[in-house]
Image (cartoon, helix red, strand yellow):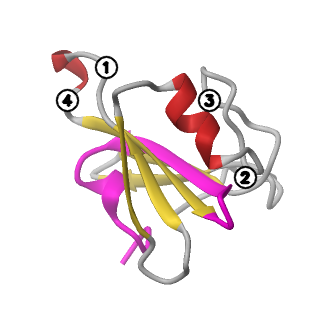
C-alpha cells in the first residue's frame, strides 16, 4: 500500500500492482462513496443505498463483518466495494478490482 507524497494518515491508501492502481483503501472518516457512505456510518446504511447487491460475511480478525457490494452491471463484474465493520459501524472500506479488493491483509 502506498500514500501520495506528503499525504497524512487520513488520506486513502493505494494498492499498486504491475504499475496500476488495483484498489483504494479508506481508513478514516471524511471520504464518502458515491452513495454517501463513510467510515463511522451504520452497517444498515450500506444495504439501504446498495439494495440487492450486498453480501455479509464474518470478519477474519474481529467480531465485525465484511459487507461486500457486488457489481452494478455485468461490465463492472471485475470490481467490488468492501466495507469492514465493528459493532455495526463502518471502520474502513476499500474499492477496487478482483482479486485484490478481497485481500484481507492488503499487501503481502
Residue at position x 49%, y 83% in the image? 61
Q: CA distance from mark 1 to mark 2?
A: 33 Å
Q: CA distance from mark 1 to mark 3?
A: 14 Å
SS category of the residue bearing label 2: loop
Residue 36 is inside the magenta segment: no
Q: Quadrant of the C terminus?
A: bottom left
**What crowding class fits label 3: few (fewer than 14 Cα within 10 Å), some (14-19), or many (20 or more)?**
few
The answer to which of marks 2 and 4 sits earlier in the sequence is 2
Q: What is the number of the mark on residue 72?
A: 1
Question: Disc 2 marks which residue?
Answer: 5
Q: Is residue 78 above or below residue 93?
A: above
**What crowding class fits label 4: few (fewer than 14 Cα within 10 Å), some (14-19), or many (20 or more)?**
few
Question: Disc 4 marks which residue?
Answer: 77
Q: CA distance from mark 4 to mark 1?
A: 8 Å
Residue 7 in percent (x, y) is at 79, 52
The answer to which of marks 2 and 3 sits earlier in the sequence is 2
Q: Is residue 105 left or right of residue 30?
A: left
SS category of the residue bearing label 3: loop
Q: CA distance from mark 2 to mark 3?
A: 23 Å
Residue 87 in percent (x, y) is at 68, 67
Span shown in magenta: 86-108
Question: Disc 3 marks which residue?
Answer: 33
The answer to which of marks 1 and 2 sits earlier in the sequence is 2
Q: Nearer the viewer, mark 2 or mark 4?
A: 4
Amino acid at each position: 500500500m502506498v500514500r501520495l507524497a506528503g499525504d497524512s494518515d487520513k488520506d486513502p491508501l493505494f494498492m499498486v500492482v504491475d504499475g496500476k492502481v488495483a484498489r483504494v483503501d479508506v481508513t478514516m472518516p471524511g471520504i464518502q462513496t458515491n452513495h454517501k457512505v463513510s467510515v463511522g456510518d451504520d452497517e444498515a446504511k450500506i444495504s439501504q443505498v446498495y439494495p440487492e447487491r450486498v453480501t455479509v460475511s464474518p470478519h477474519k480478525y474481529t467480531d465485525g463483518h465484511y459487507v461486500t457490494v457486488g457489481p452494478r452491471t455485468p461490465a463492472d463484474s471485475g470490481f467490488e466495494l468492501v466495507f469492514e465493520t465493528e459493532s455495526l459501524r463502518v471502520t474502513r472500506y476499500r474499492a477496487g478490482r478482483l482479486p485484490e479488493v478481497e485481500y484481507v491483509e492488503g499487501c503481502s
